[in-house]
Amino acid sequence: MQTCMAIAHSRPSEVALMSPSPVILTQDELKKIAAYKAVEFVESGMVLGLGTGSTAKHAVDRIGELLRQGKLTNIVGIPTSKKTHEQAASLGIPLSDLDSHPVVDLAIDGADEVDPYMNLVKGRGGSLLREKMIEGACKKFIVIVDESKLVKHLAGSGLAMPVEIVPFCWQFTSQRLKLLFEDVGCVAKLRTFSENGEPFVTDNGNYIIDLYFKKDIGDLGAASDSILRLPGVVEHGIFLGMATTVIVAGELGVTVKNNTFVLAANRTEGGHSSWV
């Protein structure tokens, strides 16, 4: 499979490393540093994908600040969730959607996991479908994380890999997801609110099944395809070959890594991310 071969053999290039920080920073401070670094790539006149989550929130705040200062002009934002829409609107960022702007110049978003090949797990905040739609339409997709999000292989953190499903017969779909990865010790759990036990509902009116793996799931392309073939599944949180740049903030400074393969593919294909 071409996709998997590209994922396995296209290591990103590390292009910048800032000086070590003299002080110990909190995780949120590291997120803010990565977010502000990403916003340096934003130029006036751009259509921007605005990510969701605690790290992306800092980037959206910064874009709003630069607009107010007049350092950025003529920006159009496409938010990846209702929450980000509300945040961006409160900051005065002009907003639109993919119907009006089907090609996005740049998206900035966080990730729950990043592997050595810049493949991602996203969606623990519940916005994976809209994130994948918008970030899949980007010429450039910058991922911002602190170093705790780096893993040797996806789902290697032991935390959830989310799958968005339709509510109809959700238990049936959940069981099929579990059986799909039975050989790697998969546990499938419906995401619920801790205070009342009610199902978490996405912006699209769907449920989230969180998958937990005891072993490496192996071929990511095959895993992705297998999940998407199940009736009842809407989308999953495995983002393969989409990130063009990953900015990592850590105790030793900020590292910027570029995936030259994806950047080249985007230039060739007019804004569509592809490993093929």
Image (spheres, grey):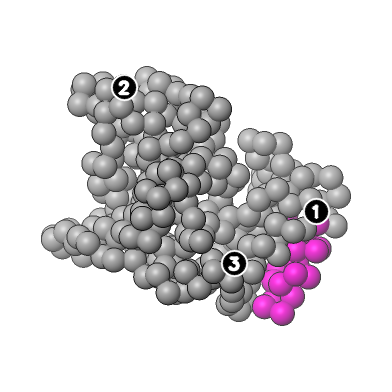
The quarter of the image holding the N terminus is bottom right
* Most foreground residue, 244 or 57: 244
Left or right of 158 in this view: 141: left
C-alpha separation, residue under disc 1 versus residue under disc 2: 42 Å
Residue extent of the magenta highlight: 173-191
Left or right of 215 in this view: 58: left
Q: Which mark is residue 117?
A: none
User: Which element carries disc 2, helix, strand or loop?
Assistant: loop
Q: Amino acid at mark 2?
A: Asn
What residue is drawn where x is 59% and y is 67%?
221
Among the two numbered marks 2 and 3 on one chain, the one whose residue lies closer to the N terminus: 2
Among the two numbered marks 1 and 2 on one chain, the one whose residue lies closer to the N terminus: 2
Per the image, the residue denoted by label 3 is 221
User: Which residue appears farthest toward the front when viewing the image?
Assistant: 268
Among the two numbered marks 3 and 1 on one chain, the one whose residue lies closer to the N terminus: 3
Q: Amino acid at mark 3?
A: Gly
